[in-house]
Amino acid sequence: MEAGEAKSKKAGGPRLCCICNQRRPVLKRPKTLQQICRECFYEVFEEEIHQVIVVNRLFKSGERVAIGASGGKDSTVLAYVLSELNRRHSYGLDLFLLSIDEGITGYRDDSLETVKRNELQYGLPLQILSYKDLYGWTMDEIVKMIGLKNNCTFCGVFRRQALDRGAALLKVDKLVTGHNADDIAETVLLNILRGDIARLSRCTSITTGEDGPIPRCKPFKYTYEKEIVMYAYFKKLDYFSTECIYSPNAYRGFAREFIKDLERLRPRAILDIIKSGEDFRIATTTKMPEQGTCERCGYISSQKWCKACVLLEGLNRGLPKMGIGRARGGINGDHTRETKAGSKSIETKQCGSLDF
Ligand SMILES: Nc1ncnc2c1ncn2[C@@H]1O[C@H](COP(=O)(O)OP(=O)(O)OP(=O)(O)O)[C@@H](O)[C@H]1O
């Protein structure tokens, strides 16, 4: 027991925040179970993110950085905290909001309204790109054609590329996303469950895509989802909290619930799963996919055509299942360069991509 806490208990006084020993605690910190006051919570929450940014050298002064902004809690808190830290610690970054409109009526149209308000609230310029403009299809139209079963594959592949295209348009040096510690632990587990060694080896990296068009960073890699929600709640941030109407995702949902159960028993479990993923090493004899460019659109790809082009071709030819499943025959034919370790195509990849 801390000295201040002991004193206040002995004196029969109220319990005090176990960090400052001055104010009344208003919350139990999910990561450490400490009883702390609101001011100390803000301080530790923001300071931990600042340390992650500094220790991992995520940014250089003068860089232009796009924040992938969906209007949800994670990216809204990221936009808020990053602009605060940028000012407070003089990072010297030029920040932008980048939103992808997947064309999901009743979901993304509403969340984009939130991002438009965030643009004004945080004073960050906003760029919106839509699937309709980029690919000629909205997700509503895609779901009408293919149904609910594989729609997350289309959405995830298109979003990944759309974010890169938006980043290129904004001429930014980096793209940051709101993926949090729970998301990463969940992805480590899913990659283990699928035996996807290639993705397992890279899903815990805080920066990815350094060899691609634009590096992506995850400043919330060690930030717990529960703390993000608490921070947004106490700070009264304006965010959109509805789940996507097209994403049932039973398998990912199961992994998510499993992690939440573990967290209830031992909060450190999330960090330990991430650590297991980080310490995982692939044997040097394992052949990994060779990175090249798509013959059709020039986007980064380990096959003849990138996944977005294959999926799009299927949609346009009225054969939407063409790009779903293992890439054998078809457009990428035998030219597919698969890893010996069994890196699968993205047939089973679901919303909240396994590649960050
Ligand atoms: N439509 C989008 N436009 C821009 N960025 C997006 C979009 N969808 C997702 N992202 C980025 O990818 C991150 C992870 O997305 P995911 O769909 O897993 O959302 P999430 O965990 O619900 O996050 P959020 O609360 O920010 O919506 C988001 O935090 C955001 O940075």
Image (cartoon, rainbow, N blue to C red):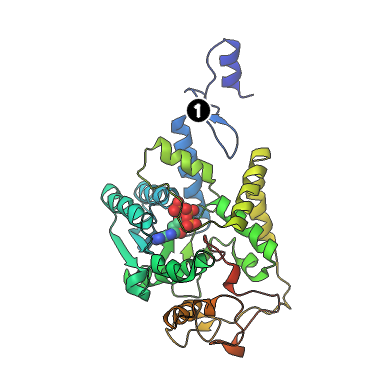
**In this view of the protein, which residue sits in the foreground, 342 or 217?**
342
Ligand 1 lies in which image quarter?
bottom left
Q: Quadrant of the N terminus?
A: top right
Residue 193 falls in which quadrant of the image? bottom right
Q: Give the answer, above or below, for where 40 lies relative to 136.
A: above
* Residue at the extreme top: 11
Q: What residue is drawn where x is 58% and y is 89%?
A: 333
Q: Which residue is rendered at x = 30% and y = 52% of the image?
A: 113
Q: Nearer the viewer, residue 157 or 165?
A: 157
SS class, disc 1: loop
Residue flagged by tag 1: what amino acid is it?
Cys
The residue carrying pointer 1 sits among few (fewer than 14), some (14 to 19) or many (20 or more) residues within 10 Å by Cα, namely some
Query: Horizontal and vertical percent for residue 269?
Result: 66, 46
Q: Is residue 7 above or below residue 183?
A: above
Question: In terms of depth relative to the viewer, which is nearer, 216 or 53?
Answer: 216
Residue 193 seen in render:
yes
Judged left or right of residue 34, residue 87 is left
Q: Is residue 138 above or below residue 108?
A: below
Q: Where is mark 1, residue-wise? A: 20
- Observer able to see residue 159: no
Residue 55 placement (x, y as % from top left): 53, 54
Query: Along the line of sight, which residue is nearer the eye, 226 or 43?
Result: 226
Q: Position of residue 83 (x, y in %)?
A: 35, 50
The spot of residue 72 in percent (x, y) is 41, 51
* Total numbered circles: 1
The response on whether ligand 1 sits within 8 Å of label 1 is no
Please give the name of the residue rendered at 66% of the width and 48% of the height, measured from the top-left corner.
Answer: 258
